[in-house]
Amino acid sequence: MKFSIAKEHLSFFYKNNYIEFESLISQRDITILKEEVPKLLALRLGIEEHRLNAQPPHLVYTSGFDSWRGSEKIKKILLRPHLGEIAAALVKSKKLRIGFDHAFYKMRCAEKEPPCFMKNRSLAALACVQGIACGLMLHVDGITFQHLANTSLTRNEAHSVIPLPQKAGNGIFFLHDAPLSLTYLASPSVSLFQILIAYARETALYRYSEDHANTHAYKRLGYVFGDPLQRDTHPFIYGR
């Protein structure tokens, strides 16, 4: 299905650095993600799923990197062509590949442990992939703007430029160089589940980033820093 981006969409996107679209994923997709992602995180941590919320937050956090590689059901949703098509239209690119995704599965806990993405940095600056075109934050469950008043966080503390999507199923596309803050992940009172998708351009490189907790992840795929991303490990989502 061809997705048409209106001039008003583009104007808003480039003026504000982001734009939100409603119902990017269905309720069925949400149900699948809520089942599959915790199952995958527990598998990667080598624990039973019911023990997931008792794990140190930073371990759960780092285990959420590239969730699409660990589940065909997750992959089918996150690498869906129509999402890539919207991203490509917004950044005016003929081809986009998956750079990486990161599942932020954050339940209320007793600990206040900062996540690895604490600095207000752009996605392009902190990612272990050079050549990021834009990002997409999909909201699956948990805190939204409407709920911020019920937490110890203020709206300004919850984000810098890129806000949280308004409700489950919505997604916010944002520019690669827009400031991004995930400081709300450090609050023990916050419960949320969202997935970040980073779209990369046709020519993209694996690089070292001291701010990316999973910066060495692609060495397991045979990469060394400076290598161009290949189609077999980072397939095109839009364009061939």
Image: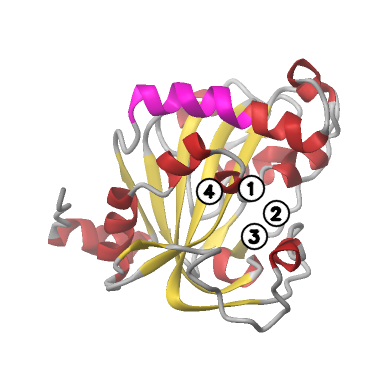
Would you name the residue on which mark 4 appears?
A: 196
Q: Which residues are magenta?
A: 26-37
Q: Residue 130's quadrant in the figure?
A: bottom right
Residue beneath label 1, please? Answer: 182
Residue 229 placement (x, y as % from top left):
55, 74
Relative horizontal placement of residue 26, taking residue 189 as reference (left or right): left
In reply to whether residue 103 is colored magenta, the answer given is no
Q: CA distance from mark 1 to mark 2?
A: 6 Å
Q: How many marks?
A: 4
Q: Which residue is mark 3?
A: 120
Is mark 1 in CB contact (under 8 Å) with mark 2? yes
Q: Which mark is residue 117?
A: 2
Q: Nearer the viewer, mark 4 or mark 2?
A: 4
Disc nearer the start of the sequence (1/2): 2
| First along the sequence among labels 1 and 3 | 3
Distance between the Cα atoms at labels 1 and 3?
A: 8 Å
The three-letter amino acid code for the residue at tag 3 is Asn
